[in-house]
Image (tube, rainbow, N blue to C red):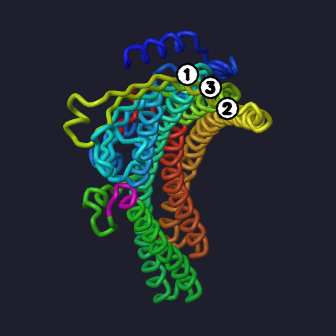
Amino acid sequence: MLRNLMTAASALALAACATGPDYAAPQTPSAAAGKFVAATSPAVDPLAPVQGDWWRLYDDPALDQLIADALAANTDVRVAVARLARARASLREVRTDRLPEVGVGAGANYGRLPESQRGPGAPREDWSIDAGLEVSYEVDLAGRVTRGIEAARGDVGAAEADVEAVRVTVAAETARAYADAAASAERIAVAERIVALLDRSLTLTERRREVGLTTGLDTARIATLRNQRQAEIPALAAERDAALFRLATLTGRAPADLPQIARERVATLRLDQPIPVGDGAQLLARRPDIRAAERRLAAATARIGVATADLYPRVTLGGSIGSTGPDIGDVFGAGPLRWLLGSLINWSFTDQARGRARIAGAEADTQAALAEFDGTVLRSLQETETALSAYARALDRRIALKAARDAAERAARIVRAQQREGQVDSLALLDAERTFAEAEAQLAAIDAGIADAQINLFKSLGGGWGTRAAG
């Protein structure tokens, strides 16, 4: 009986066809596949492929360890991995629709039969025990199950790409928090050097005041500048603490549990080699958010077929075999055997308007998914070009600020010597000291900005993950 049922099901399945459009991957603009417009700086290499573990370019073992900790314990990564596991479970559930449903049932009743229904010599009151096996199988004539599996596979692919996208973000933000903490420490050191320099100038000015070579006003002016620079240090310390607390959260720790290695670096992250960036074609193939958008489009396209299949009849083949008797021995022994083969057609032909509305909704979802894919492609190109441009401009700005700082340092040295010889007054020294202090602070700030621009660029490039996310 079961063999006959499966033979009929196989014959019908061979004749089945999947309704709805077959999915075709969307095309991206040909202009997006070439070299980046802003990849003109010697600090980037448009020919080298992007390195997956790009943070190793900084050659900082502490950063390597912190990012490894973050990828293993970050709560956002854990959420994304759990959602991937949920999508995979849904796919396994949908795949079971291809299999026949098998059920076993049994029941026992005690009752009295009418006289006309009793056999000769049979008791009027007795037990009736029934047990049987039932099998049913939906023939996927319209491809509802096939398209459902395609949609679930698309959801899994999108969830896998989402995990990669979260990992790219977590790696970048962990590096950023570490870089911010290190840059703040360096800026604190710069501020402390400036304060120490102003302390020496203040001491010299006070000595000159004591011998009548200057006035108390000059001393007050130098003291004011010194105190202003001193007041910047607590704000920088607060920025460093905030970066360290952020780093603790990113690595899945409480702030008190952050390892000491996270606090040891006191110099801004710097690169001594060009950043490999590749080209647009590599970017579009690498960015996980683009891959996720493409997989969601595939899932939405498949759901058009699911909705379309509901316009057609559903054919279910079924069969059962069992036995009924007054006791267990009769049921599983030589008792009377019954079996049944049949089919069921379920067709809501009077509700076509509702079905076509669902199709229209699925088509609208597909158009939205296509627009989202196109938007993701364009945003990825925009983000990368913007990051390249910002990095190049930051480097240009540093060159100018470095020259200004060096010139201000030379000028301050000259003015200090001239003041000691009585050639200039303390106001000239104050102006020179203020100019040097501002130039030194600006150079430290642009160094921090360059590290931030580098991390933005690495993040926009998509991380270059070479393997799919593990769930």
State the image quarter where residue 2 is shown: top left
Q: Residue at x 27, y 65 (%)?
A: 257
- Tell me where residue 86 appears, x and y as whole percent: 43, 43
Q: Nearer the viewer, mark 3 or mark 1?
A: 1
Q: Is residue 452 left or right of residue 21?
A: left
- Tell me where residue 13 appears, x and y as whole percent: 52, 14
Question: Magenta segment, which residues?
Answer: 247-253
Task: Quickly name the residue at label 1.
Answer: 140
Instruction: Answer with mark 3 or mark 1, whichever residue precedes in sequence.
Output: 3
Q: Amino acid at mark 2?
A: Ala
Task: Quickly name the residue at label 3.
Answer: 36
Q: Amino acid at mark 3?
A: Phe
Q: Residue at x 38, y 62 (%)?
A: 244
On screen, residue 133 above or below 244: above
Magenta stretch contains residue 48: no
On screen, residue 234 above or below 110: below
State the image quarter where residue 292 is shown: top right
Q: Label 1's element?
A: loop
Task: Quickly name the residue at label 2.
Answer: 307
User: Which residue occupies the foreground of this view, 104 or 452?
Assistant: 104
Specify the label residue 376 is tagged with. Answer: none
User: Which residue occupies the foreground of this view, 278 or 463?
Assistant: 463
Instruction: Answer with mark 2 or mark 1, whichever residue precedes in sequence.
Output: 1
- Tell me where residue 250 appears, x and y as whole percent: 39, 56
- Tell me where residue 429 appears, x and y as whole percent: 56, 70
**Label 2 CA crowd tier, 10 Å (few <14, some 14–19, many 20+):** many
Q: How many angstroms separate mark 2 from mark 1 (CA)?
A: 14 Å
